[in-house]
Image: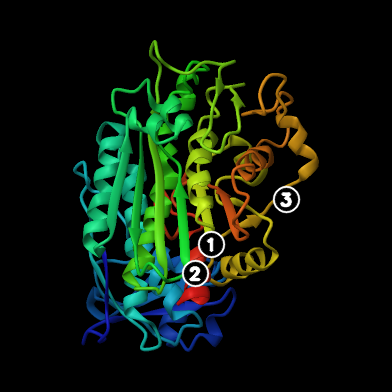
Amino acid sequence: MPVELVETKPKNALPVHLVARDGLETASLAPSSIAWARANGFSGEAGRTLIVPGEGGALAGALFGTGDGALAIGALARALPEGDWHFASALAEPELAAIALLLGGYVFTRYGKKPGKTLRFALSRDADAARIRRIADGVFLTRDLVNTPTSDMGPDQLEAAVRTLAAAHKAEVSVTRGDDLLTQNFPMIHAVGRASADAPRLIDMNWGPKNAPKVTLVGKGVCFDTGGLDIKPSSGMLLMKKDMGGAANVLGLASMIMAARLKVRLRVLIPAVENSIAGNAFRPGDVLASRKGISVEIGNTDAEGRLVLADALALADDEKPQLLVDMATLTGAARVALGPDLPPFYTGDEALASELAAASVAVEDPLWRMPLWSPYDAKLSSRIADINNVTTDGFAGSITAALFLKRFVEKTAAWAHFDIFAWNPSDRPHGPAGGEAQGIRALESVISKRFG
């Protein structure tokens, strides 16, 4: 790991001084450090790092401009020279700063990229080291899964990843695969995935005491999305390895929950498919049966994620869990509305919405509530079936996708849908460009407070 947190400050650890904008004089710095900062045009600009030299060319420490939140501290993981470091003063958010350092040091090394330098950082005595590490581990699991190309992360390998996580925490896994999806009444998962060389499947992981409160996570596991017969242009397929980002995120969240030994009955449902093209691919205009008995006309085969989620949500809803969450890289409309960094979430549960909004701010895991605007539900009407999987006018695509899913959740009061991007288009302080965990740190906070 490029950043290692240690609970005892190394003897020769160098200090990092946090400096507010135009706050050099109030940062308890030596006069020589202030002079060096002024000579280099440093006045505490948010996110900027300045290395401070000592006698004989040795390092004396570093200055870091604050102001962009605790997660901005993650930039130090890439900006500081290798060695031992500590913060020169107490931190307002010691745990969040430590998480930021770990996340900022992430490197995806599966295909030969070198991990780079290693930093050791002294952990604040006020920080919970075990919690920090399990949060980082969950995020790293999510990033690794999303970053892996489909050649090594198809439905078979995604199932293997679930089994590996389950084995680490003594969870149980069952899988309904191929034509068994038809006999077990998951017709839409089968229809979306049947054209792939890798059989479609529903992965079902269970952990925790059976009499504990039920928390169910559903993740979209479309391991690659060509768009089906409504084929995407080549530019639209470049990032489609990340279309299983919902599955990756719920697995990262499940890792956090199980590592914390929360007193819940955790269930994770992942419909794992590839939306491929072949002679048996489902077609525009087809009408699919669903597990819930709702017939669905296919207006566009590229709106496949909501189909596989619908069958999985119908199964989850039968148990009436105390909390039901689904996560999916579902619509481009969500990105148009809010951009790549701010995922929308939908829920009709006002208490849950308030908790998610508060947690989002507290742990700096951006989320924004969007409305389940019922007047738009009519846009999903079909002339020959109960519902269409898309609208015809192209408006409010993320909202209408959420309304589609809502049709399949009737018994569970506390349900939330997250329309995530699961990707950093460019480097950010707490993570490089590539696969990203979104919403799961906020969810971990909510679930821990509700059921911990």
Q: Is residue 4 above or below residue 104?
A: below
The answer to whether mark 2 and mark 1 are in CB contact below 8 A is yes
- Badge 1 marks a residue whose secondary structure is strand
Give coordinates of residue 319: x percent, y percent: 50, 56
The residue drawn where x is 47% and y is 20% is 228
Question: Residue 163 versus residue 134: which sits nearer the camera?
Answer: 163
| Mark 2 or 1, nearer chain start | 1
The residue carrying mark 2 is: 447
| Mark 3 or 1, nearer chain start | 1
Apparent side of residue 411 relative to residue 153 in the rendered image (left or right): right
Residue 371 - label: 3
Q: Nearer the viewer, mark 2 or mark 1?
A: 1
Marks 3/2: CA–CA distance: 22 Å
Marks 2/1: CA–CA distance: 9 Å
Residue 323 - label: 1
Marks 3/1: CA–CA distance: 19 Å
The answer to whether mark 3 and mark 1 are in CB contact below 8 A is no
Question: Residue 430 versus residue 231: which sits nearer the camera?
Answer: 231
Q: Is residue 217 above or below residue 264?
A: above
Quadrant in which residue 382 is drawn: top right
Residue 268 - label: none
